[in-house]
Amino acid sequence: MRTIEKYVFHSFLTAFLLAWLVLSFVLTIGLLVRIAELIVQGVSAHVIGQFMLIGFPETLWLTIPLSLLVSALLVFSRLSADSEIAAMRACGVNLLSVMRAPLLFAAFCTLLCAYVNNEIVPRAHELRNNLKALASVDTVIKLLEPGRNIDEFDKVKLFFTRKEGNWLYNLRANDFTQEGITRLITADKVLISTNGSDIVFDMYNVCIDPIDVGKPGMATMSRFTYVITDAMQQRGFNRKEKDYRFVEMRQTIAALRKGTAREDARPPEMMEGEPRHSVSPREPWANLTDTERQRRLSICRTLFNKRLVEAFAALCFVLVGVPLGIKTHRKDSTIGMGVSLIVALVYYVIIILATELQKNPTLYPHLLIWLPVAICGVLAMVLIPRNL
């Protein structure tokens, strides 16, 4: 018995790995195109490497369930076509025991996908946007062109006549960082570099006019360091509900249900210590109207349940794919691929439709989004007794 189970699971696992590699390559083509663009722009290898590391895990929530579905259909349809299923039945082998190892593996994949959806994907989305900001800063440094006004940085405009590597010559900068005045900073030569998210200008033979708000005079100095702080953060993004991880989402839902803004239940961008320029404009929940609070609650609930439903696709696809694979009993693998495409399409279309209703709490979209799981459960209860 265990020999048969190992044989079936080995075939299942091999098909899964091959399908996963193919699907992962297809879904990462867009990432590869983006990386190629960054290489052309001259972005550093460090930033490009980070793009690759955080971009690949984001595809796991989709590639793992689809790979399980394809492998279940192909392996069990082949076993049926080669009469191996019939031979197992004739020998008194319980086919449910043959399904046990693939189902346990699918359950493990469900937990993995739930972790990916609730922890890795939100974090990767945040990191990717911050890396885009970092890449934009890196690109700006490399693509600074002499002889034109440069206004890519907030509250600073630059102009210089010549560039050699990271050295800029005859720099003229209009500084608007101090309210009420515009400072003119000139320098014979400048060495430009980065320090984290800051851009540092190490200036030589500098003239500043005026010196400060309280000092209207002009000052000259042989060397002066000028820093554009948080240049990356200036190109950052506002976090939304989809960027919340598991604990953050649960705290947000609990606080919205109570209509309060408890400190321990606030979204991360409302916590102390976060820079104000990265805060998305949110009213305290206690001041929201009941309609707006219910709408936000519905959005958070739907997104939270969506992550779980997408994770349960791994288990659902195996429960449905195994009996469907036995039922097709054709040697032509295109039959299994066609069936898997239809099953996956219906599953994810229902998720998309329910997600589109997330702003309408009267329709209970956070419950409707579980409909594909329920459908797969019913199909499994009908198909498994008939085909095993």
Image (spheres, rainbow, N blue to C red):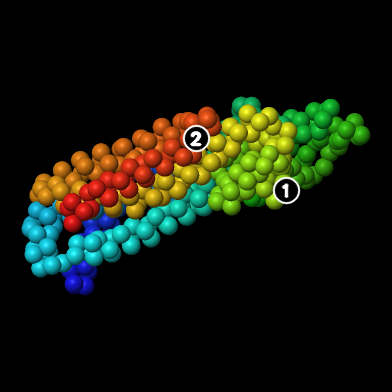
Q: How far apart are marks 1 and 2 (CA)?
A: 28 Å
**Residue in the foreground of this view, choosing between 289 and 307:** 289
Q: Find numbered disc 1 in the image and state the secondary structure of the residue it sits on.
A: helix
- Disc assigned to residue 263: 1
Q: In which quarter of the view is residue 8 placed?
A: bottom left
**Residue in the foreground of this view, choosing between 134 and 172:** 134
Percent x, y for residue 24?
Answer: 33, 49
Instruction: Give neighbour class at mark 1: few <14, some 14-19, many 20+ (Cα, 10 Å).
Output: few
Percent x, y for residue 187?
Answer: 74, 37
Q: Find numbered disc 2 in the image and state the secondary structure of the residue it sits on.
A: loop
**Residue in the foreground of this view, choosing between 163 and 185:** 185
- Disc assigned to residue 355: none
- Amino acid type at image mark 2: Tyr
Instruction: Give neighbour class at mark 2: few <14, some 14-19, many 20+ (Cα, 10 Å).
Output: some
Dot 1 or dot 2, earlier in sequence: 1
Asked if one can make out residue 161 in the rendered structure from this viewpoint, the answer is: no
Percent x, y for residue 149?
Answer: 64, 27
The residue under label 2 is 364
Asked if one can make out residue 151 in the rendered structure from this viewpoint, the answer is: yes
Q: Residue at x 42, y 42 (%)?
A: 370
**Residue in the foreground of this view, choosing between 317 and 66:** 317
